[in-house]
Amino acid sequence: MKFLIIHGPNLNMLGKREKIIYGEKTLAEINSLLKKQAEELEVEIISFQSNSEGAIIDFIQEQSPKADGMIINPGALTHYSFCLRDALLDTKLPIVEVHLSNIYAREEWRAKSVIAPIAKGQISGLGWRSYVFALQALVSELRDKT
């Protein structure tokens, strides 16, 4: 099985920006933890980060035909990117939306996700573990179906 891990805008700044909200771990550290978890689960992951909405959509369109599921932290695109939502929906893959912080405990505008209605689930507020739990859940669910 192969899973796409997509990190949206500003996530390249993890470990530097608002550590009290987003934690100490860098994106490279999170990707390393995910790679280790993927190896333990005997699955493959492809991680991608961009600050560009178009680049994220291009990646989804290019890579999704070869994937079994996706984990995405859309960053601020969560709240308004209908073109990202459409690209995700078009894949027909199971998707888990993740957020490092609890988006429901922050500013009111952050509590609205245009991605959540098309996602299998959402994990929010558990820091870097949100990604690991999402990978475990997707793998478990797909294995249960086979």
Image: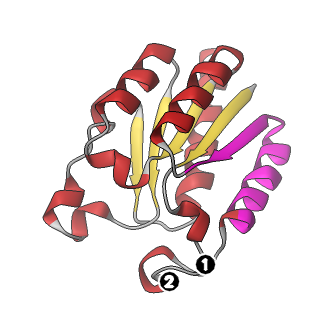
Identify the image quadrant of residue 84. top left
In the foreground, 34 or 58? 58
Residue 121 vs 89, above or below: the answer is below
Identify the image quadrant of residue 30. bottom right
Residue 67 placement, left or right of 95: right
Q: Where is residue 139 in the image (x, y as percent from the top left)?
A: 65, 33
Residue 43 vs 135, above or below: the answer is above
Residues at marks 1 and 2 touching, judged by CB atoms closer than 8 Å: yes
- Residue in view at x 61 percent, y 78 percent: 15
In the foreground, 26 or 141? 26
Secondary structure found at label 2 = helix
Amino acid type, residue under disc 2 in the picture: Lys
Magenta part of the protein: which range?
Answer: 28-50
Residue 124 placement, left or right of 27: left
* Residue placed under numbered mark 2 in the picture: 19
Q: Residue 66 carries which label?
A: none
Q: Is residue 92 visible?
A: no
* Residue placed under numbered mark 1 in the picture: 15
